[in-house]
Image (cartoon, helix red, strand yellow):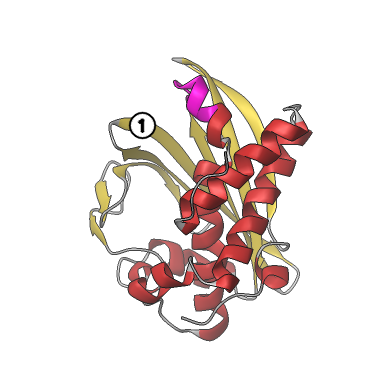
Amino acid sequence: MPEPTVAGGVSDVRRTLGTRTLEAGEAKVATISRAYPTTVDDLWDACTNPRRLPRWFLPVEGELAVGGKYQLAGNAGGTVERCDAPHSFAATWEYGGDVSWIEVTLTPEGDGARLTLEHVAHVNDDARWAQYGPGAVGVGWDLALSSGLARHIETGESVDPAAAEAWTGSPEGVAFISAASAGWAQAWIAEGWPAEDALAAAARTTAFYTGQPEPA
């Protein structure tokens, strides 16, 4: 798998944190955004075409239409709740008994297109949130959108899942994940979380994603 550079992969990403009030109460919103050298139509196809998704993300089964159920291989499933092709879609993100929501928006930007993904989730485990913070889900989206989608858009190549998994433990992969974790820590600090705690959580998140022992 060709590795994205840390400078070209992680620093190009915008990350913010916020909250949203849902019927069940307040939810955390982690937002990640990145521009790509392609058109909105092509970016939409890469994100919604079931034949193309496995080339950079995961195989998907089900009906990718409003009201349809989907299932990503070995990962989340859910229901498509809204679709305004080729501009935006929203779906539930159901994994391990938890239900959260994703909202994806595509907009033209300069000669390319920008993808903005909001992951909305209730935090029911305060201890786990303090342990890992937003990087627990955020770094996964960094890997998908930079290591996966950006490489696919820029080169047309497909991701080899085995090579991608091995890459996360390589020096390049660890550097990428460390930088992504740090980026989410900075977003958390900007939201008002104590810097020392946010950076410690980022170190634990990096260890989790790279298979290294967690720092004491």
Compared to residue 112, the image places residue 91 above or below, namely above
**In-image side of 158 versus 134 (left or right):** left
Of all residues shown, which one is farthest toward the front? 216
SS class, disc 1: strand
**In-image side of 191 versus 61 (left or right):** right
The answer to which of 178 and 154 lies nearer the viewer is 178
Compared to residue 101, the image places residue 130 above or below, namely above
Residue 191 inside the magenta-drawn segment: no
Q: What residue type is labelled 1?
A: Val
The answer to which of 116 and 124 lies nearer the viewer is 124
Residue 189 visible to an observer of this rendering = yes
**In-image side of 156 versus 4 (left or right):** left
Q: Which residue is drawn at 34% across and 31% down?
A: 98
**Where is residue 195 drawn, in percent x and y?**
76, 34
Give the image quarter of residue 146. bottom right
**Where is residue 115 drawn, in percent x and y?**
59, 58
Q: In which quarter of the image is the C terminus?
A: top right
**Where is residue 44 drawn, in percent x and y?**
48, 64
Point out the stretch of residues depicted in magenta: 122-129
Give the image quarter of residue 91. top left
* Other residues around mark 1 within 10 Å, as few (<14) / some (14–19) / many (≥20): some
The answer to which of 174 and 100 lies nearer the viewer is 174
Give the image quarter of residue 172. bottom right
The answer to which of 132 and 112 lies nearer the viewer is 132
Residue 127 inside the magenta-drawn segment: yes
Which residue in the structure is indicated by mark 1?
99
Residue 88 visible to an observer of this rendering = no
